[in-house]
Image (cartoon, grey):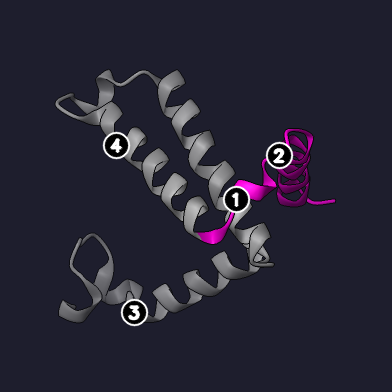
Amino acid sequence: MSDIQEITAAIAQFNRDRDWDQFHNGKDLSIALSIEASELLELFLWKDPKDVKREKISEELADVFCYAFQMADRYGFDVKEIVMEKLAKNAEKYPVEKARGVATKYTEL
């Protein structure tokens, strides 16, 4: 079992034990994911990034991952596969020779 499969299985068991699957449809998982990502952003609001506590970043990032893995599981996506596909698409949009060291959108490279 891969790390991703182990994590996904642990999250699924946690939810089954609490009968929470009934609440975890695509819409609500998307909303929860967005809220947790916003909580991660909130840690940095009005602060120098170096002043944010690593423990808090870890907690919020874990929440983001949990909802993202649940969403992938709900729709039957292979996390590794979809991430690798997205990286390949981004490599085409952002070739190294044009994108290296610049934060320009691919449409403007």
| Label 4 or label 2, whichever comes before in sequence order | 2
Instruction: Give the structural element (helix, strand or loop) at label 2.
Output: helix
| Label 2 or label 1, whichever comes before in sequence order | 2
- For the point 58% across and 69% down, which residue is it? 82
Instruction: Give the structural element (helix, strand or loop) at label 4.
Output: helix
Specify whether 59 is left or right of 10.
left
Q: Position of residue 14 (x, y in %)?
A: 73, 35
Q: Main secondary structure of the magenta part?
A: helix
| Label 3 or label 1, whichever comes before in sequence order | 1
* Mark in the foreground, 3 or 1: 1
| Label 4 or label 3, whichever comes before in sequence order | 4
- For the point 48% across and 58% down, which residue is it? 27
Q: Where, by quadrant of the figure, is residue 100 drawn? A: bottom left
Q: Position of residue 35 (x, y in %)?
A: 38, 42
Q: Which residues are magenta?
A: 1-26
CA–CA distance between discs 3 and 1? 34 Å
Check disc 1 and give the amino acid type. His
Residue 11 magenta:
yes
CA–CA distance between discs 4 and 2? 26 Å
Graded by Cα atoms within 10 Å as few (under 14), some (14 to 19) or many (20 or more), the crowding at tag 4 reads: few
Check disc 3 and give the amino acid type. Lys
Residue matched to label 1: 24
Q: Are marks 4 and 3 in contact (CB under 8 Å)?
A: no
Residue matched to label 2: 15
CA–CA distance between discs 3 and 2? 38 Å
Q: Which mark is residue 41?
A: 4
Residue matched to label 3: 93
* Mark in the foreground, 4 or 1: 1
Q: Are marks 2 and 1 in contact (CB under 8 Å)?
A: yes
Q: Are marks 3 and 1 in contact (CB under 8 Å)?
A: no
